[in-house]
Image: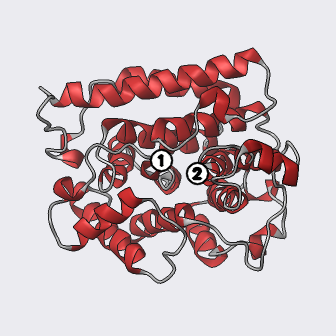
Amino acid sequence: MRAASGSLFGLAYGDSLGKPTEFQEYAQIVARYGPGGPRRLEGEPALVTDDTQMALAVGEALFEVSSITPATFEPVLRRRFVEWAASPENDRAPGMTCLRACSALADGRPWTRATQSDSKGCGANMRVTPVGLVPGLSDDQRAGAAQLQAGLTHGHPTGLAASELTAYAVRWLSDGLAPSALLEALRERCAEQRKIYRGDWLGELWQRPTVSSPEEFIALGWDECAAALDRVKAALAAGNYAGDPCLATGAGWIAEEALATALYVYLISPEEPVAVVGRGAASSGDSDSIACLAGAFAGAALGLAAWPADWQTQIEYADRLFRLGTAWD
């Protein structure tokens, strides 16, 4: 089925389709593309945004290390992020949180001081898909790596929890979990992990003037993500899928809303991947991040063959996506 390739290419396809619609009002998007949003890649190559670029940085860091531990993963991930920030290809209007954190990482300070501690922007989880696709990881490795890659730039607990949930959604779908069971599985993980602080991976990140314990710190993140998942459940139950999806589950600028709205647009029609990414791109919020996560979910569940064949040669960075996908399929 080639689930890893399907998910990585799906991420890039959604990102590319959402690139021109980000910052546009929903009415503008519908006027140009129709209510289903864009359904064709544009350009040769079809360009992506920093979402795909940073996902590749995470994926190639994972590919580089022989054993994924906090000690091995952090320095390689730091280097990949700093290289991305300094690259001339970093010209896709990246978020200021990522840029500020990467600047601080570049001077060698501990990452817990470089991170933007109060940020839970969607930059935390729009790039985490590769963590869900690497085969053979233990639960601690997958959860820890998902949270660490978020924490290097986004230090808010909700960014950490949303990143872990995003990675696990990709993992479970690629392993064959029915889309209809996904929301409940994610909600259960919120409850199970609510007071688990992964100190080996996160160090002293939890320490804040108003926080009394690491358990209190991380519980906030899981609670906010649980509330976002509940909004997805309610929106799907309402059954009225027309219009701007951001009105139902959030604009996606913050991590838990990017996850929620991507899940919402995916779960409306999980067997129709092109419709999924088009719907994600037809949104008034962070369209590229919403569509890229929705595409990652659809591709993980359906595999590479579910996407239009000619898209694979049209999308930017196809060679790098193919390399990682082939290694992990």
Q: Nearer the viewer, residue 210 or 135?
A: 210
Give the label on residue 122, or none.
1
Q: Earlier in the sequence, mark 1 or mark 2?
A: 1
Q: Label 1, label 2: how many angstroms apart (C-alpha)? A: 7 Å
Residue 24 place in picture, x, y as percent: 69, 51
Q: Are marks 1 and 2 in contact (CB under 8 Å)?
A: yes
Q: Nearer the viewer, residue 53 or 27?
A: 27
**Type of residue at label 2?**
Ser
Rendered image quadrant of residue 20: bottom right
Quick check: can you spot residue 11? yes
Res 246 → quadrant? top right
Could you say where residue 310 lies in the image, as x and y percent from the top left?
84, 70
Q: Position of residue 92 (x, y in %)?
A: 55, 70
User: What is the x, y in percent for residue 179?
Assistant: 68, 32
Q: Is residue 189 visible?
A: no
Q: Amino acid at mark 1?
A: Cys
For disc 2, the marked residue is: 289
Left or right, 82 with reference to 46? left
- Marker count (numbered): 2
Position of 117 with respect to 11 (left or right) is left
